Image: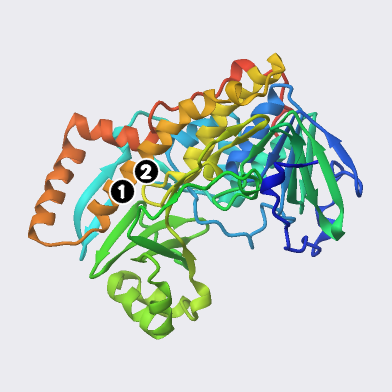
Amino acid sequence: MPWPPSARRPDHRAGDTAGADAARTPDTPDADDTVDTDVAVVGAGPAGLALSLMLLRSGVRVALVEKSSGDPASAGRDFHGEVLQPGGQRVLDRLGVLSPARARGARRLTGFRLLDRGRVLLDVDYGRLPGPYDHLLALPQRHLLAELLAACRSLPGFRHLPGHRVSALTGGHGRCTGVVATGPGGRRVTVRARVVAGADGRYSKTRALAGIGAGRTEAFDQDVVWFSLPAPGRATGTVAVHRAPGSAVLVHDTHPDRLRVGWTLPHRGWPAVAARGVEAVRAELTAALPQFADLIRDHVRALDDLRLLDVFAAHADTWVRDGLVLLGDAAHTHGPLGAQGVNLALQDAAALHPVLVDALRADDCSRGRLAAFPRLRGPAAEAVTRMQKVQAKALLGAGGPAADVLRSHAARLVGRTPLGTRITRRIAYGRTPPEVRTDLFTVRTPAPRRA
């Protein structure tokens, strides 16, 4: 039966029918089928795939439900959250996917810089951290997702359901026991699971179907408009925040030979900006980034070349129910400052993995048993939100003599003192970073592919 009854929300969106044949894989169930598994993971982003891989390595059966039917390695798929902090790199390295994902194409970045009209106000050098994770890494998510998915497919107990949208949760007496998903051509699949893990992002359907509030707050004064520019030979080697009158622009290198640009605007101010037209937008961007004016004029040709990110913070009302757990953006959402989103998602997966293994072994997937996860990761998520609020005021707030003096003091603190190194390490790894519990791995992975 649908679960919980009071939270039923019909899904009026049509299932993806384009590429239906491509979505059919050997591990996809037949039409109107039932899949029995241990854990149903909803969402094949970094959190869902990393969690799936850890569980599979621990001998746990996993069914992965993902609404997209496309190949995650497709160059046509674009993601904004691609800068990996050292904490996220370490998780991926422990899983054996960092090197092959990096080999597909990535850019090493030395740290963060804050600039005002070309003058460096703040320089956060990750080279002060111990190796091998003494840098940021701009790794296209399509490369990361492709390697994680390939690793999952190589292991027994994996069922992959691409092109399937979750339309209902199943269960009764307050317990979630699975999901119903609609796939290409209207196929309905019921996935019966001992636990459902919702890793389906900031607008989580799993969370909504469970009747759990998103806990959204308008914590930031800015939204971000993202775009990328071809820039052969123009690499910057860092993540730079260029202050400009009334806004700031984030720039970093990305693969292959491109610049990723994030233009900050007043929260909900994009409609007024867009109404002025693309010529006015180009003029503002070239004034903020004169060193890239030629690229902006050549490649920002229409407003459709820009993508708006609604920036907000959220902390779901609860992360666990009997038989249900939320992780990543489905549980807590953050702004783009500090490049924390993907890293938090990967660390969530590392923290949840031993909790689920313990619950499954004990045959107790109750809310009380799963509560160990939010107890560990809730404070870490809240700490990131607090940090990002401070960063937004420091990096994007109003200028003036007093503010410039404060930023100068902060620059000396971060760049020249041991306390600055500790602050950099906290940004890089977060609060109490979880370790990947490789001691729980019982299934050997196949030998690496040879070129």
According to the picture, the residue beneath numbered tag 1 turns out to be 389
> Quarter-wise, where is residue 243 in the image?
bottom left
Q: Position of residue 255 (x, y in %)?
A: 51, 56
Q: How many marks?
A: 2
Q: Residue at x 61, y 26 (%)?
A: 367
Quadrant of the snapshot with the C terminus? top right
Left or right of 39, for residue 413:
left
Q: Amino acid at mark 2?
A: Thr
Residue 302 seen from this side: yes
Q: Which of 128/316 is in front?
A: 316
Q: Amino acid at mark 1?
A: Lys
* Mark 1 residue element: helix
* Mark 2 residue element: helix
Residue 450 seen from this side: no
Q: Residues within 10 Å of mark 2 (few under 14, many from 20)?
A: many
- Kindly identify which numbered label has been placed on residue 37: none
Q: Residues within 10 Å of mark 1 (few under 14, many from 20)?
A: some
Vertical placement of 1 versus 283: above or below? above
Left or right of 160, for residue 375:
left
Q: How is the image coloured?
A: rainbow
Vertical placement of 190 versus 407: above or below? above
Q: Residue at x 16, y 62 (%)?
A: 399
Q: Residue at x 32, y 42 (%)?
A: 386
Quadrant of the snapshot with the N terminus? top right
- Kindly identify which numbered label has been placed on residue 385: 2
Q: Check whether the beta carbons of the residues at disc 1 and disc 2 lie within 8 A of each other.
A: yes
Q: Residue at x 57, y 48 (%)?
A: 201
Q: Position of residue 160 (x, y in %)?
A: 78, 42
Q: Position of residue 170 (x, y in %)?
A: 76, 39
> Quarter-wise, where is residue 241 in the image?
bottom left
